[in-house]
Image (spheres, rainbow, N blue to C red):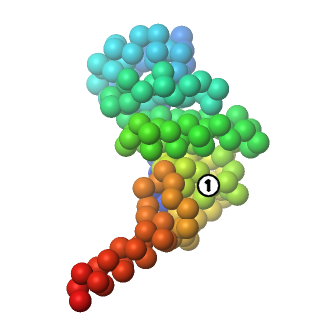
Amino acid sequence: MPLVKGGKITGDSFAAVADGAEPPAAGDILVSAARFLADPEPLLQRAGKVGVIWPNNRDVDDLVPHLGRLAAVALVFPNFRDGRAYSQARLLRERFSYHGELRATGQVLRDQFVFMLRAGFDAFEVKKDADAEAFAQTVKRYSVFYQPTGDGRLSALHRRMQLRHSESAGS
């Protein structure tokens, strides 16, 4: 499955580890929320980064105490009509200041890509190679937005205000 990150199609350094399987001694891993919360310390103390696959029907508050030690959080879109992962992404970025990789997984569709970016996602697991290329191009398409959101970019209004402030300071 292709991974789009930072506007580029890239290899995935994370290996998904099934709940009953032994994690490798080293290397980056993604584990389920249930497995991670059951006993996070052995996973976090091994060599390699740890990420968690977080279902959209679980409260992100359960994850907050561990955010500083997680390299990635993969939020699940079980179908295209279910947008709870958007809310989770905004909470993680804006309320809890999560700076690690925020990955969209599951039903990640082309027509929702810009909205996912704006919610704070920075990595996307897509089903088709053609979709991966479209996602990589979309990142470059828009540089200014009107609405402030979780991706950290300034809105058009805030850009204008900065420009006016710098012009008045220079006078």
24 lies above or below 80: above
Q: Looking at the image, which is closer to me, 15 or 122?
A: 122
Left or right: where does residue 38 sit relative to residue 55?
left
Dot 1: what SS? helix
Please say whether residue 103 is visible from this viewpoint.
no
Residue 55 in the image: x percent, y percent?
60, 27
Q: Looking at the image, which is closer to me, 171 or 85?
A: 171
- Residue at horizontal 49%, vertical 71%? 156
Please say whether residue 63 is visible from this viewpoint.
yes
- Residue at horizontal 33%, vertical 21%? 44
The amino acid type found where label 1 is placed reads: Phe
Residue 82 in the image: x percent, y percent?
72, 38
155 lies above or below 44: below
Q: Where, by quadrant of the figure, is residue 135 drawn?
A: bottom right
- Residue at horizontal 55%, vertical 62%? 147
108 lies above or below 110: above
User: What quarter of the picture does the C terminus occupy?
Assistant: bottom left
User: What quarter of the picture does the N terminus occupy?
Assistant: top right
Left or right: where does residue 154 sit relative to residue 113?
left
Label 1 sits on residue? 115
Residue 130 in the image: x percent, y percent?
66, 58
- Residue at horizontal 33%, vertical 25%? 26
10 Å crowding of disc 1: few (<14), some (14-19), many (20+): few
Q: Which residue lies furthest to the right in this view?
A: 81
Residue 87 in the image: x percent, y percent?
59, 40
